[in-house]
Amino acid sequence: MMQLKVVAIDGNLNVVHQNNVQFDSELPEFRTQGGVHIHTDRLTVTSPVLMWVKALDLLLDKMKRAGLDLSRVRALSGSGQQHGSVFWRRGASQTLRDLDPDQNLTQLLQHSFSVSDSPVWMDSSSSQQCLDLQAAAGGALRLAEITGSRAYERFTGNQIAKLLQSRPDEYQDTERISLVSSFAASLFLGDYAAIDYSDGSGMNLLDIRTRTWSEICLEATAPHLDRLLGAPQPSTSVLGPVSSYFMRRFGFSESCSVVAFTGDNPASLAGMRLQQGDIAVSLGTSDTVFLWIQQPRPALEGHIFCNPVDWQAYMALLCFKNGSLTRERIRNECAGASWEVFSAALRETPLGNNGNIGFYFDTMEITPPAVGVHRFDPDDKKVSSVSPQVEVRALVEGQFLSRRLHAERLGYSIIPGTRVLATGGASSNKEILQVLSDVFNAPVYTIDLSNSACLGSAYRALHGLVAESGVSFSDVVKKAPEPQLAATPHPTAQEVYNKMLKRYARLEERVLQESRP
């Protein structure tokens, strides 16, 4: 999280204002790099809470100076990077309720946090706590079945357990624990804001089916934790009106509603306007896959969260480490460093690559946990090399078969009307998108993701005003610009890739066996 950003939209979903505060350059006194402090153990990564507070002061001042009439804001929501936590000191709730509009938030809240540096998503210092939680839950898979994910070091519950064990005095001085999202909502509300179901799913603490805190996980993490967390609420909840502090200091209207804030990934799903059956693929340094699913099947890889815009549905997230850097390596080695030659190789080779399949894990992959380059001929025999054109198609088909295989294992299914939404650097390459369309047997559309979490928060604020009356999120955002159609599947794609997917799954098991120490 390198910046605090705002997007304002009007009733027709047009963006009417954008602004941001860059943490490193505009708040240099906090001495962050990329908005964080990486500690000497290289595992602990934190951000100063007061930096976030000061950034909000700055951002609202910038909005006022830009002439934005904040009295016209009907509703606001927001998002924060998932998993990070904020620990409020005893008495902070009273401070929040009594904010003096003649002073800025930074002055008023400087003594309100029992932990001054918040653990953030990059932190990986709670390995022992992860093992303890999985043992208490009955194993990694059982924990995933309850909370949507196996134990991860960055997940909030494990960070709370670590704080209790390593700094008990600070934990004892804590009155409330917020996620970054609910912390930001609390500032606007003038009271502790509830954690929403969707962001709460990234803590290893929420039972994603009952949408309540899991007793097993709470007890394994810290005593009386339910009191410190408060009851979770639906992501579409209106938490209340904006506090009098913001009315008097910045001119917000007393009728302005604060809609539950959520995590950055759930907010991105809203910003992309995913619908049932859709899948979004972000083709970047690492490839990220967002899924809308109805019947989740949690696994040891990937994450399942409660859906932020439809409380009866779920979303899933899969991350693949070997993305664009691997595509660039194969381009350099097999296509003379030319994307044109790379694209021609995809055009000139048949769907299914005459039965050749490849796995290209230049660095240890997350999904699945394997490493190395593994090539197989049509008879499933391992081969050390193939022609450059075959290599190019083996890479791209292999990557997208992997995305589909692991999405389906989490409960995703391709249905009539399924769309694949593509974004990121490689989404500008028509031939790569054609392979994506063929492998998923669905049309591919391109979208701009640069503002997705911010825009999703604005859409969610608008939806929050009418969600109680049963209006769907898709109805609220139907006027938003449509994504651009980029590719449609070849008539034979379904037959070719349904067979190939079964082979790919079998071969992946072999690759996993070979990758184990």
Image (cartoon, grey):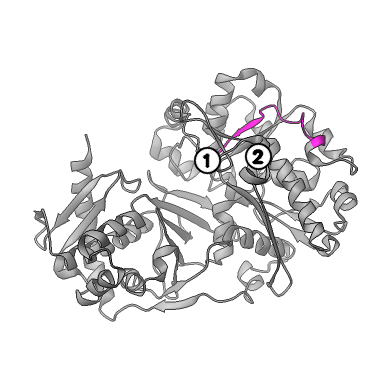
Magenta stretch secondary structure, dominant: loop
Percent of width and height locating residue 320: 37, 52
Q: Amino acid at mark 2?
A: Pro
Which residue shows up at 71% across the image and 22% down it? 173
Q: Quadrant of residue 137?
A: top left
Residue 471: numbered disc = none
Q: What is the span of residues highlighted in magenta in the rendered image? A: 107-120
Which residue shows up at 22% across the image and 58% down it? 504
User: On the rendered structure, is 259 left or right of 347?
Assistant: right
Q: Nearer the viewer, residue 99 or 438?
A: 99
User: On the rendered structure, is 94 left or right of 297?
Assistant: right
> According to the image, label 2 marks what residue?
28
Do the CB atoms of the residues marked 2 and 1 lie less than 8 Å apart?
Answer: no
Nearest to N terminus: mark 2 or mark 1: 2
Q: Amino acid at mark 1?
A: Trp
Residue 121: numbered disc = 1
Q: Is residue 89 above or below residue 507?
A: above
Distance between the Cα atoms at labels 2 and 1? 22 Å
Few, some or many C-alpha atoms within 10 Å of disc 1 (few <14, some 14-19, many ≥20)? some
Which residue shows up at 43% across the image and 39% down it? 150
**Marker count (numbered):** 2
Q: Nearer the viewer, residue 112 or 23?
A: 23
Q: Quadrant of residue 356?
A: bottom left
Residue lying at the far bottom of the rendered structure: 491
Percent of width and height locating residue 378: 11, 63
Few, some or many C-alpha atoms within 10 Å of disc 2 (few <14, some 14-19, many ≥20)? few
The quadrant in which the C terminus is found is: top left
Percent of width and height locating residue 302: 41, 48
Helix, strand or loop for disc 1: loop
Q: Is residue 358 above or below residue 131?
A: below
Q: Nearer the viewer, mark 2 or mark 1?
A: 2
